[in-house]
Amino acid sequence: MMKSQIVFTLAAALMAVLTPSLYAEIIGGSSDTSPPPFWENSFWGMTSSIERAFPFTTPSGGPYIIEELEVAAYHYEGMTGATAYFSINADNAGEPGDVQALVELTGITTSQQVLSVDFTDELILGGDTSYWLVGGTNQGQVNWNFGDMAFGTAAYRVDEGEWTILSGANVSAFAILGNPVPEPSTILLLGLGVPFLSGLRRKR
């Protein structure tokens, strides 16, 4: 009976720890909704020479493990197979700075829709910190739809030159999803709990 109570209590604790990680929260974006709402036929164009960028500030608390990026994008007819790249950059005095992580978005079609890509390499962003999402393409033109009623700061640059900052501009639709970094006690619980439960099962 005692073993059953211990197993139940520990399993419940582990479930409480693991459950939040199944539901990533919005760490930054054009709105507080995932997937981000967007306007059709309204966009900033990205070409092999023009990059677009939008700032965001992470929530207080953190740090956060970044898991997924959602953007609304499409391309014109005749550009099948178009891809885009997106990077999260540090803020450098109000403009995009050093790249923190880079992902490639594939599967862009002529349909205007929200697409997503996972961050495969671990990326941890600080809480209440400013960053930029930068987008571009190496071929053709990818259209990054405006977010629905999303206005603020935008930036662009041509041929990797100086950034031009725009205020009161349309902000393209995006959502960056992640979770708070687990506390050390949580990691310890996970490390001790799983082997303990396995050991109890073997003894039965």
Image: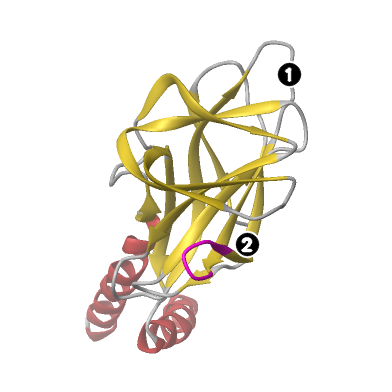
* Left or right for 75, reference 26: right
Reply yes or no: does residue 174 show up in magenta: no
Prevailing secondary structure of the magenta residues: loop
Nearest the eye: 186 or 40: 40
Dividing the picture into quadrants, the one containing residue 90 is bottom right
Give the residue drawn at x 50%, y 51%.
68
Give the residue drawn at x 32%, y 38%.
150
Give the residue drawn at x 43%, y 80%.
190
Q: In this view, does 198 lie above or below 139?
A: below
Q: Can residue 15 be seen in this view?
A: yes
Give the residue drawn at x 48%, y 42%.
70
* Left or right for 99, reference 28: right
Which residue in the protein does label 2 denote?
101
**Image coords of residue 50 (percent x, y):** 67, 39
**Image coords of residue 81 (percent x, y):** 74, 24
Which image quarter holds the C terminus? bottom left
The magenta stretch is 92-96
Which image quarter holds the N terminus? bottom left
Nearest the eye: 198 or 124: 124
Which residue in the protein does label 1 denote?
80
- Compare marks 1 and 2 and give the one earlier in the sequence: 1
Query: How many marks on residues?
Result: 2
